[in-house]
Amino acid sequence: MGLFKSILNTVPRPLLIKASYFVKPFIAFYLKGSNFTDPIDGKSFRKFLPYGYGNQRENALSPSTLSLERHRLLWLFLKEDTDFFKPANNQELSFNLRGPSDKAKLRVLHMAPEQCFLKRFKQQKNIDYTTADLYSPIADVKADICDLPFEENSFDVVFCNHVLEHISDDTKAMQELYRVLKPGGLGIFQIPQDLSRTVTFEDDSITDPKERAKLFGQYDHVRVYGRDYFDKLRKVGFVVNELDYTKKIAPELVKRFCLTPGEILPVCSKG
């Protein structure tokens, strides 16, 4: 466990991303088993890897897809409650993304794309998939989230997960996400959140990485979001559904998929 923690805290994230492509097949083979299953690829393991920059979480990181709890939760939501993976004209699901005669591909923007989704989303024939980030080596477009190089109302779906806690001017970033999302579009903006906090804690004067890790949970975070995060999104203009999606999943599957009970999915739309 100490080794993983040390690697996370000392190796720059772009290098970690590149190295993981070579390492993960060997780890996945070594950890084969039947205790836990990654719903993204359906593969099972005797255990998942620990993960965390501070206090590490047991059975958090899938050896095969490198998904974390939040990724697996999002995948299940998209699969079961939206038509993200469906062809056009599917109107059976509660978070439908298409109109009755819309046969065009969904335009999707993915900020700071996660490896567990990247290849799978790129292979989907029903979406036009664009990835963007300022530093990620696997993103298509080099872009500042506070000044996105896309026209207003460009995308049907926008993913921006565990990014805003790194951004000093998160209000400006939220405004940009709102600007590029189409009216009626779907936005998922997950963040690390302390639900016991009513108000978000941030202090721009704290710049020391060790102090940030101590106060914000990670060396490159600039705040700890509280429950007011959803209202921050609403003030920008989003309609926000605070979805406790694990309540819709059988308890035995929550355990098998290594999800975090009570994690809230901020499901946003642009009216």
Image: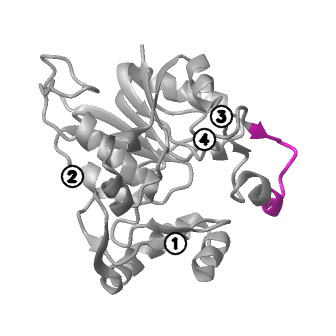
**SS for dot 4:** helix
Q: Which residues are magenta?
A: 201-211
Q: Residue at x 65, y 44 (%)?
A: 194
Q: Is residue 261 left or right of residue 118?
A: right
Question: Within 10 angstroms of label 2, few (less than 14), some, or many (20 or more) residues?
Answer: few
Q: Which residue is mark 2?
A: 123
Q: Residue at x 26, y 35 (%)?
A: 81
Q: Which residue is mark 4?
A: 164
Where is residue 99? Give x, y as percent.
19, 17
**Disc sitting over residue 191 in the figure:** none
Of tags 1 and 2, the one toward the viewer is 1
Of tags 2 and 3, the one toward the viewer is 3
Q: Are marks 3 and 4 in contact (CB under 8 Å)?
A: yes
Q: Residue at x 70, y 44 (%)?
A: 224
Q: Amino acid at mark 4?
A: Leu
**Disc sitting over residue 50 in the figure:** 1
**SS for dot 2:** helix
Q: Are marks 1 and 2 in contact (CB under 8 Å)?
A: no
Separation (CA) of disc 4 from disc 2: 27 Å
Of tags 1 and 3, the one toward the viewer is 1
In reply to whether residue 202 is colored magenta, the answer given is yes
The mark nearer the N terminus, 4 or 1, is: 1
Where is residue 82? Give x, y as percent.
26, 33
In reply to whether residue 26 is colored magenta, the answer given is no
Q: Amino acid at mark 2?
A: Gln
**Disc sitting over residue 170 in the figure:** 3
